Each structure stands twice: as structure tokens, then as C-alpha cells.
Amino acid sequence: MFKVDELLDFSDDEYQKFEEKLTDRECEVLKLKRRGWTDYDIAEELYLSRRTIQRTLRKIEYKIIKNI
């Protein structure tokens, strides 16, 4: 099964292909995750709960699996 962590190793071109299918919030979360931020740090930065960040990452995984 595909995991968001696999996106961290994608080239910028591969990443942009997926970014077009994501919402602005999902892109924002994914960019921070690619920079090595933890779920907790992302939640603090975006004023969201850690659970919301985890849910957003699962949505990203689903969208990517659906489009591979």
C-alpha cells in the first residue's frame, strides 16, 4: 500500500503531478511533511489538531492510490 512518506522521495516533477489533484490545504500539509516536519509541528503551524493532520495525510494517500 502506498504511504505519504514515499512522496518524500519523489522528484519535483513527480510531486507536481500529484499536487494538481490535491486541495490547497492538502498541498500545504504535504509541503511541510516533505520538509521533514512532524504531524505535531504541522498541526501547531496551521492551528489544527494533530488528528486533522493525520486525516489529511490519509486523504492524500487515498487520492494518490486512486490515481496511480
Image (cartoon, rainbow, N blue to C red):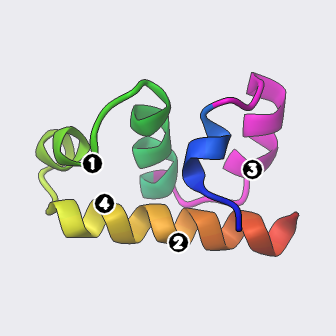
Question: From mark 4 to mark 3, how far is it between C-alphas?
Answer: 18 Å
Quarter holding the C terminus? bottom right
Closer to the N terminus: mark 1 or mark 3? 3
Task: Give the SS element for disc 4.
Answer: helix
- Mark 4, Cα crowd under 10 Å, few <14 / some 14-19 / many 20+, is many
What is the quadrant of residue 6 in the picture? top right
Which segment is the magenta one? 9-24
Residue located beneath label 4 in the image: 53
Q: Which one is nearer the viewer's eye here, 52 or 24?
A: 52
Q: Nearer the viewer, mark 1 or mark 2?
A: 1
Question: In the shown orientation, is residue 39 left or right of residue 15?
Answer: left
For badge 2, the amino acid type reads Lys
Mark 3 or mark 2: whose residue is earlier in sequence = 3
Residue type beneath disc 1: Asp
* Residue 63: numbered disc: none
The vertical placement of 61 against 35, above or below, is below
| Furthest-front residue in this view | 1
First along the sequence among labels 1 and 2: 1
Structural distance between the alpha carbons of marks 3 and 2 = 13 Å
Q: Are marks 1 and 4 in contact (CB under 8 Å)?
A: yes
Q: Name the residue under label 1.
A: 39
